[in-house]
Amino acid sequence: MKPFEIVETPIDTQKYADYVLHAGAGAVTIFTGNVREWTHGVRTLYLAYEAYIPMAEKKLAEIGAEMEERWPGVKVAIVHRIGELDISDIAVLIAVSSPHRKAAYEANEYAIERIKEVVPIWKKEIWEDGEEWIGAQKRYPGEGKSSN
């Protein structure tokens, strides 16, 4: 198992939780980012993710190294799924173990923010009334609609 990877199949939460668990871990936090149906009053049908895989996996590993330096004793696994994802599917999973819970929570939150900042993964939202690639910009009702 690679602790920092991009996958095209459903994410097995237990596999990553097992990877980070060890005898010195007093806490394990698991964050999953799931596909939601409604965003700012707009109904999402599904999402499509793409990634520059070699660079994305390298950046995920760099984030893991940053976390290990900032919170000594943590063990990290991060996986992001690409392809078409349905409502409730897991898009990203971050597993962090630590001797103490506070560090595990803090490191986990740090990871998702860094992923959004530096990892080359792009999301296309497909709605009832159109679709749009989403990057740093945000879509709100009435903004950026395309009609297909």
Image (tube, helix red, strand yellow):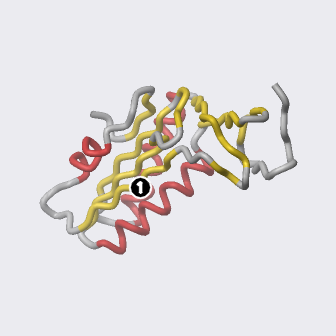
- Residue that appears at 16% across and 64% down: 24
5, above or below 24, in the image: above
- Image coordinates of residue 75 in percent, x first then y, are 29, 55
In screen coordinates, is 145 left or right of 72?
right
| Mark 1 surroundings: few (<14), some (14-19) or many (≥20) residues within 10 A | some
In screen coordinates, is 49 left or right of 108?
right
Residue 9, quarter of the rendered image: top left
In screen coordinates, is 6 left or right of 20?
right
- Image coordinates of residue 66 in percent, x first then y, are 45, 56
Amino acid type at circle 1 is: Phe
Quadrant where the N terminus sits is: top left
Quadrant where the C terminus sits is: top right
Q: Nearer the viewer, residue 21 or 74?
A: 21
In screen coordinates, is 117 left or right of 75?
right
- Image coordinates of residue 2 in percent, x first then y, are 32, 35
- Image coordinates of residue 110 in percent, x first then y, are 49, 61
Q: In terms of secondary structure, where does tag 1 sit? A: strand
Q: Nearer the viewer, residue 37 or 31?
A: 37
- Residue that appears at 20% across and 63% down: 25
- Residue that appears at 60% across and 37% down: 120
Which residue reaches farthest left? Answer: 23
Q: Nearer the viewer, residue 98 or 91?
A: 91
Label total for image: 1
Which residue in the protein does label 1 denote?
31
